[in-house]
Every structure is written in C-alpha cells, then in structure tokens.
Image (tube, rainbow, N blue to C red):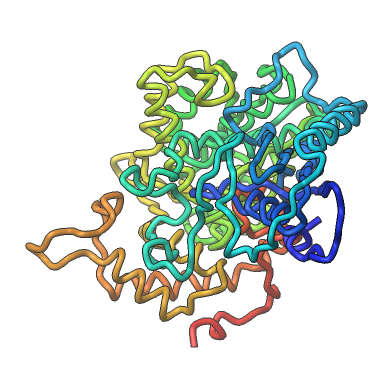
Amino acid sequence: MASESIDILSEDIHSDLLIIPTALPVYAPPVPDNTYLYTLLHLHSVHSCPVLFAAASWWESTTDRVASGMTAIIADGKCRALNQGLVDPYNPLPPSGESPIPDPNAEAAYTSAATAVLAFSEKPQATKAKTKAESSPVAVGIGEAVSKTSFDPNDPDTYTLLNPLPFLPPLTAQPTYARSELDYARRVLRLQALGLARRLLHTGIRHAVIGISGGLDSTLALLAVCAAFRVARLPAANIHCLAMPGFGSSARTAGNAVRLTSSLGLNLNTVDIRPACRQHFHDIGQDPDTHDTTFENVQARERTQILMDLANRLGGLVVGTGDLSELALGWCTYNGDHMSMYAVNSGVSKTLARMMLRAFSHALTNGTNTANALDFAPSDATELSAVLRDIVATPISPELLPLDDAGEIKQSTEAVLGPYELTDFFLYNFLSVGPTREQILDAAIRLFASPPEGSDDSRDPRLAHLRLSPEQIEHYLNGFYRRVINNQFKRSCLPDGVAITPLNLSPRRGWRIPSDAAANAWLS
C-alpha cells in the first residue's frame, strides 16, 4: 500500500476497527518526518474508530529500500502503542544467540494487537471529522503528542533552498526536533546494514568481498558490511577486504586502509594491479604515458574484475562502495566501480558520508559505547576513531593518475566538480523537481558565495572553509547539469542498493530520465 492509498480511504466508511497492513518503506530524513503517524491520527479522527497499523519488516525485499517494520495502535485520540522496528537504532538487535529471521508463526502477535486495540475503545465516542489541517498534532510516543515536523515549502525558515546542507541534520542550535549527527549516522548505518543483511540471508551467501582504498566511500561501506554481518549473525572472518594499489595510490590512503581493517579486526589482502594494467595497455595498444580516460578506466575495471572473480571463488558477494553524489555526476567507470552485487552507499551523499565518519570518530573518541555507535564492536575503538578522522581529512580523489614528485595526490575530485557541499545542494534541489535552475543558482550564490573582504561571514559555519565567487558557483552548476543528464546511461543499469531518502537514483524506483536526454533542456 502506498502512502497516498492511506489518505484516500473514504470518509463514508463506518467500521469498528481500521487495520492497515502495508509494505511502506522507511527512509532516514535528516529531520524526523511523522507523516505516517499524522495520517493515522487523521484517519482515527475521521472514522471515529481505533486504527491498527502494521508495516512489513526488513525481511521484505531490499532491492531498493527497506520496509519499516513499524507497528502502531491509535485509539482515544492518542498513539497507544508504537514500535519503530529494527530500523530504529535505539531498538537493539536480537541477542547473538537468536535468529534474525522473523518467526513464521508471528500471526498471534497481530491477533493480540487487534484485541488490545478494541480493549482501548470498545465503543468509540463519535467525533467531528476534521480535515488534515485541523487534526491534532501527531502522537510520536506512547500517550504523547508533538507537532508534525518536516520541511514546509511555504515556510521560509525551512524551505530547502535556504538549507545549504539538505542531506545533513540542522545544526544543534536549530529546532530541538533535529536529530544529532550521531543519531542520524546510526540510523543511516542501520538501514545500510539491514539492506545488505537481507540480501545475504535471502541468497544464503556467507562471504562479502570489498575493495578498500583508504578513502571515504570504501570506509563507510566497510562499516556497513560489519554491521550487516552483525545483523545476519555471520562471522567477521568472512569479510574479505582487498587493497588494490594502482598508479595513483598514495602512502596515506594505503596506510589508512591497513589501519582501518586492523582496527576492525579484519584481514587485508593486497593485489598490485599495475602489472596487469601494463599488460592490458600492451594488449590494446595504449601508450602507458598517455594519462587519458582509458588509462584511468583500465585500473577501475581491473579492480572490479578482481573483486568479482574473487567473490566467485569464495561464493561471496561484491559490496559496492560508490555514493549517491558520484552516481549523480557519473563520476565512476562504467562497468568498473559503477558495478557490484549490492551497493550499500548508493543512497548516501558525499556530505553525509563525511558527516557519518566524523560522528562515529567523535563518539568513539569520547568513550561512547561502541555498540551504541556502530551496532558492532571494533577491535580497537581508539585506533578506529583516529583513522576515521584522518580519512575524513584526506583530499577526495579517485587516485587513478600518477602522484606528483613528492608522492602526494595531485588528482583532486573537488577541483574538477566543485566542493561536494555545493554539489549536494544542487543535487537535493534538482531531485526535488521543484526549483528551477535560476532559483537554485540564486539560492546557491546567497548561501555559498564568499563575503566581501573585511565583511562578516554570515554563512552556515560548516561552509566557512569554502571560497567561492558567484561566477564559480554558476560554472559548477552548469557542469552539474551536464554531468547528471549526460551520465544517465550509467544509472540505467545500477545494481541493487538501499535508498536512504526518497530522493534516490534507482532506475527501478528512483529518479529516472531517458539515457539520451539533452542537458540543454535544463540549461536553456
């Protein structure tokens, strides 16, 4: 049942009990959205009867999203019972001795719940039907009521065009309903883990293969794999990490790959791809001193081939590491890092990935219980915190071009695409299919442009490190449109992966356009 279906139930229906079974997905919006409960309370008001809501659990298909597992009982004007399911990181996972697979005989629980609903209100008191706008605030806790919270396009304080980092929770100085960075990071990681765990349990696959570069995306993906193995009750020894240094790999990222896997108690094997790439250059007649697209893509595809073949040998599953921002821009090699067997980061923007690693590092540094932070216990929390901090500070790069004379990375992604804070602002508003290019540009200049020299910087403090002129912002926006539209062919054949918000790029359930659309239609 879609959310729209809940809204259109006829007000002429007369019943003693409304039972709503559904397979609605759950997302992790930066600001809590109580729309479902708001709708249930409205139905309760309109029909003057108790409402029993039961959503499918994470054991539903996770091809593109995770079902919420939420159950709720609405009676006598309040939420009498509420369980957010396993997607709520504050709902602990089952003890390690218990199977995560749902009990097939769980129908008795539904019978008990229905009985409980009727017991709350055997004779519902007639109430005047209210419109959704007139309904009471939605109840989000047992017997408690708070106002519905979500971005309102009519409210200039919350309109997305005034939010420079829309994929992140607002600053703590913002309204108290905002999630903390750690709370939000945990919720996103739980969604990633449940999606992958469901796929592993469905297929019976007990091994995961993942490439570790020492960069942002592969690090977050590895944390999600560790959490998924905790959910699926699989041994961590079955996580196979592979470092595959190429012509642009730096000592810093290589060292961080070693530190990361060691702090998680995992083994890291290394396959130097350079000999195989040189042989391939020879086979296809590529000059190895010509550092063009072919030079770069040969390395990306060699890595994917190694991961796929190793997974076949082990009977395992290749976990993809590419993120939402890269997929939007086509910043990946077709049939290279673009492809995997399950993509855990496909719904995570680059700014969100940074925030998550920073939040986990901070929590571990400050002695937060590791199970509360990550859903699993690393071997060395102190070392994990330190390496996460350094990974966040490392310049973002595909590391496909040779290093400079000092052995440092000279291929900077953000030097080409623009800062990811700006890219993700463009992406969020573009996928919202609301603001025009001109509106996005005007808002971006207002939010991101550097203040005149000597003036106070009134921008969001998280943007203080950016130095951008209006001309640069427009340049990056035009490049954004061209890359997003021209690279749709890559997204038309994406592997399965969990959506984190409704704004996702799945060719099955997300944002879709023809692969041969013209960017000028958006730029003109």
Residue 127 at x, y percent in the picture: 70, 56
Q: Is residue 250 above or below residue 13?
A: above
- Drawn side of residue 258 relative to residue 114, left or right: left
Residue 157 falls in image quadrant:
bottom left
Asked if residue 13 lies left or right of residue 389, the reply is right
The relative height of residue 117 versus residue 523 in the rendered view (above or below) is above
| Residue 35 location (% of width, % of height) | 62, 54
Q: Nearer the viewer, residue 216 or 349?
A: 349
Answer whether residue 163 is visible to the viewer in this image: yes
Q: Nearer the viewer, residue 23 or 242?
A: 23
In the image: residue 176, left or right of residue 276: left
Q: Is residue 44 left or right of residue 15?
A: left
How many discs mark residues in the rendered view?
0
Point out the image quarter for the N terminus: bottom right
Quick one: which residue is furthest to the top in this view? 97
Query: Hey, which residue is sitting farthest left in the picture?
Result: 454
Give x and y (percent) for residue 183: 48, 35
Tell me which corner region of the image, top left, top right, bottom left or bottom right, holds residue 87: top right
Residue at image point 36% right, 71% down: 443
- Give whichever of 16, 285 is nearer the camera: 16
> Which residue: 79% across, 48% down?
23
Of residue 316 and residue 130, the one placed in the foreground of this image is 130
Q: Is residue 283 visible?
A: no
Q: Position of residue 326 (x, y in %)?
A: 54, 55
Q: What is the residue that sits farthest to the bottom in this orientation?
A: 524
